[in-house]
């Protein structure tokens, strides 16, 4: 897992000695080998991170911070805010590990920049399972890529070897059959157990396109607004995207990528409602295609973080405003569409989804090709979106034939364009 020369360093910020011991024990139970350092409150943690004399001058920089919420002197949220305001520390991912499962704590942590949130169970067997999931998501998943720097993009075989397995939680979600009440209950229970996924579901249910007048606060209420199919696909996509996240922040802004993907999924949903019923793809395919369509950007970051940073530095700097695919053709040996399709194949996702990931920027894909009409819908929606931060700067010219090919009459085009752009702006300006 970790190399002898580069141990994976975790700073555990936890005031309770027993809790700290249990976390250490649960890591060992899961055979997750790390260099575990500990601070007993927020002040000591900041002294450690800033290498203050006399105790911390040689303290190794952590690859990950595990942060408790309720601590004396400086609480977890205050400590998190201080870390994220410090330019030299803000790149270190902070994962909250707290006994609190209150929504306000989950949302406050995410608002302040926590990368993830885990509830610390009282039962030690459940704690071992929680630490196993945390380890799979944040500690062990990037190892293969770290051990194979730069080589992966050159050959498909090496690239495939560097990709992670489909995460366990995604396999669990995929195995749930929603045709029965039991399946729906199982899904909602699973979502409830994962605060990070729960936050995404609640956030979507409260987002402007769903237009509820009351605030949605529970997964049960979210199910009423969104339906279980949407919840399943959002949970699945978020679990997949989380498993590809880099251990320290790079120039690809994952929050913006998720927002862009959500806007595309919502816009495709709006588009599908204007299509004749017999042409509409299933709702779950719309969300999976929309939410995963650009996952290839994360693949690049996963297999070659330096190259990914160079690409994003170019698109934010000298290449600003140019289509991603154009820059990729200049800088990379493979683009995000091909990388996304390779990952989707590696994870055995449906052929339709693989085709969308591969062809979402390709014009002229035959109307009866695998992946249609989702490919045409993604392609059209991308051209409609206003140029927000994660815009791929796709030229916006849309031919009337593209609308007609989806079965949408010309007299509905203006209304749909307005609705899709309005929803996109509302999602971007909504609090996250
Ligand atoms: Fe996109
Ligand atoms: Fe794209």
Image (cartoon, rainbow, N blue to C red):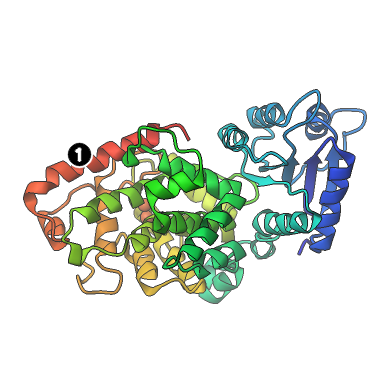
> Which residue lies most toward the left here?
411
Quadrant position of residue 172:
bottom right
Q: In the displayed structure, would residue 390 be above or below residue 239?
A: above
Tell me residue 56's x, y (percent). 88, 34
> Which residue lies most toward the right here?
54
Q: How many marks?
A: 1
Tell me residue 31's x, y (percent). 81, 64
Classify residue 302 as left or right of residue 128: left
Tell me residue 90's x, y (percent). 65, 35
Quadrant position of residue 135:
bottom right
Residue at figure coordinates x 35%, y 70% from the top left: 352
Given residues 75 and 50, the one toward you in this image is 75
Residue at figure coordinates x 73%, y 42% from the top left: 65
> Which residue lies most toward the bottom here?
157
> Which residue lies most toward the top here?
73
Classify residue 206 as left or right of residue 36: left
- Locate the N terminus and report the quarter of the image it occupies: bottom right
Given residues 49 and 38, the one toward you in this image is 38
Q: In the displayed structure, would residue 42 be above or below residue 93?
A: above
Q: Is residue 314 visible?
A: no
Residue at figure coordinates x 57%, y 55% from the top left: 189
Tell me residue 9's x, y (percent). 79, 49
Q: Is residue 98 visible?
A: yes
Secondary element type, mark 1 = helix
Q: In the displayed structure, would residue 354 be above or below residue 210?
A: below
Residue at figure coordinates x 45%, y 31% from the top left: 431
User: Local crowd at mark 1 within 10 Å, few (<14), some, or many (≥20)?
Assistant: few
Quadrant position of residue 319:
top left
Q: Which residue is mark 1?
A: 418
Classify residue 355 as left or right of residue 56: left
């Amino acid at each position: 897992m970790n190399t002898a020369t580069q141990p994976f360093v975790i700073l555990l910020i936890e005031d309770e000695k027993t809790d700290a011991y249990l976390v250490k024990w649960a890591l060992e139970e899961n055979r997750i080998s790390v260099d575990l350092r500990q601070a007993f409150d927020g002040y000591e943690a900041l002294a450690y991170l800033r290498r203050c004399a006399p105790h911390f001058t040689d303290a190794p920089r952590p690859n990950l911070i595990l942060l408790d919420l309720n601590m004396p002197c400086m609480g977890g949220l205050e400590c998190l805010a201080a870390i994220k305001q410090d330019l030299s520390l803000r790149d270190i991912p902070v994962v909250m590990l707290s006994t609190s499962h209150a929504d306000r704590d989950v949302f406050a942590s995410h608002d302040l920049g926590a990368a993830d949130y885990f509830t610390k169970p009282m039962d030690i067997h459940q704690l071992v399972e929680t630490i196993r999931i945390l380890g799979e998501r944040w500690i062990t998943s990037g190892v293969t890529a770290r051990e194979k720097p730069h080589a992966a993009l050159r050959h498909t075989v090496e690239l495939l070897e560097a990709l992670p397995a489909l995460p366990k939680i995604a396999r669990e979600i995929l195995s749930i059959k929603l045709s029965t009440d039991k399946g729906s209950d199982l899904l909602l229970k699973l979502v409830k157990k994962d605060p990070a996924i729960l936050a995404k579901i609640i956030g979507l249910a409260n987002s402007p396109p769903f237009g509820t007048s009351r605030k949605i606060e529970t997964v049960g209420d979210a199910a009423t607004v969104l339906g279980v199919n949407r919840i399943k696909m959002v949970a699945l996509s978020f679990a997949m995207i989380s498993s590809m996240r880099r251990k320290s922040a790079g120039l690809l802004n994952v929050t913006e990528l998720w927002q862009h993907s959500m806007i595309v999924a919502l816009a495709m949903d709006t588009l599908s409602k204007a299509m004749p019923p017999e042409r509409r793809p299933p709702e779950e395919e719309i969300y999976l295609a929309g939410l995963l369509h650009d996952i290839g950007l994360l693949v690049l970051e996963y297999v070659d973080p330096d190259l990914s940073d160079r690409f994003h530095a170019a698109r934010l700097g000298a290449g600003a405003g140019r289509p991603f695919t154009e820059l990729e053709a200049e800088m990379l040996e493979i683009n995000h569409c091909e990388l996304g399709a390779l990952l989707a194949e590696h994870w055995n996702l449906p052929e339709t989804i693989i085709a969308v990931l591969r062809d979402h920027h390709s014009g002229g894909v035959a109307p009866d090709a695998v992946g249609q009409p989702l490919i045409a819908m993604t392609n059209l929606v991308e051209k409609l979106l206003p140029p927000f931060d994660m815009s791929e700067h796709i030229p916006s010219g849309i031919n009337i034939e593209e609308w007609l090919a989806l079965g949408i009459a010309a007299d509905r085009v203006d209304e749909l364009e307005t609705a899709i752009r309005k929803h996109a702006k509302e999602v971007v300006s909504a609090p996250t």
